[in-house]
Amino acid sequence: MCQTTAYIVRDGEEEPVLQDVISVTPGESGVRLVNLFGEEKTVPGRIRQIDLLAHRIIIQAGPHSAEHKGKRTSPQPR
């Protein structure tokens, strides 16, 4: 498939966040990503680049993003 992979940039290093991304929604708490299989992640940061030809979304890490590394950051139900 030719779906897009989202990457986050922290300390100048790119790391993959989610593959097969089909939806990107910027918001106040970060960038919400949804992939082809319905998996959702909200990444703290801002969109730096979307390269459709290379199938890449680059998200610049926002403040406090290191504490979210490897964790689901979407709000959890109460």
Image: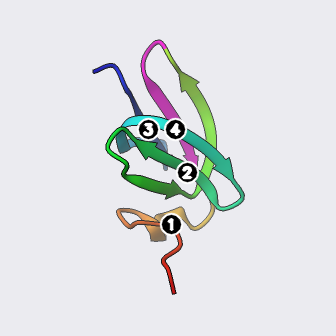
- Tags 4 and 1 touching, CB below 8 Å: no
- Tags 4 and 2 touching, CB below 8 Å: yes
For the stretch drawn in magenta, what is the main secondary structure? strand
Give amino acid for label 3: Ala
Q: Secondary structure at mark 2?
A: strand
- Residue that mark 3 sits on: 6
- As drawn, the label of residue 74 is 1
In magenta stretch: residue 7: no
Cα separation, mark 3 vs mark 2, equals: 11 Å
Please report the bounds of the magenta region as a residue range.
53-62
- Residue that mark 4 sits on: 23
- Tags 2 and 1 touching, CB below 8 Å: yes
Residue 63 vs 31, above or below: the answer is below
- Residue in the image at 65% along x and 62% along y: 29
Q: Quadrant of the N terminus?
A: top left
> x, y percentage for residue 25?
62, 44
Question: Around disc 1, counting alpha carbons within 10 Å, would you say few (fewer than 14), some (14 to 19), or many (20 or more)?
Answer: some
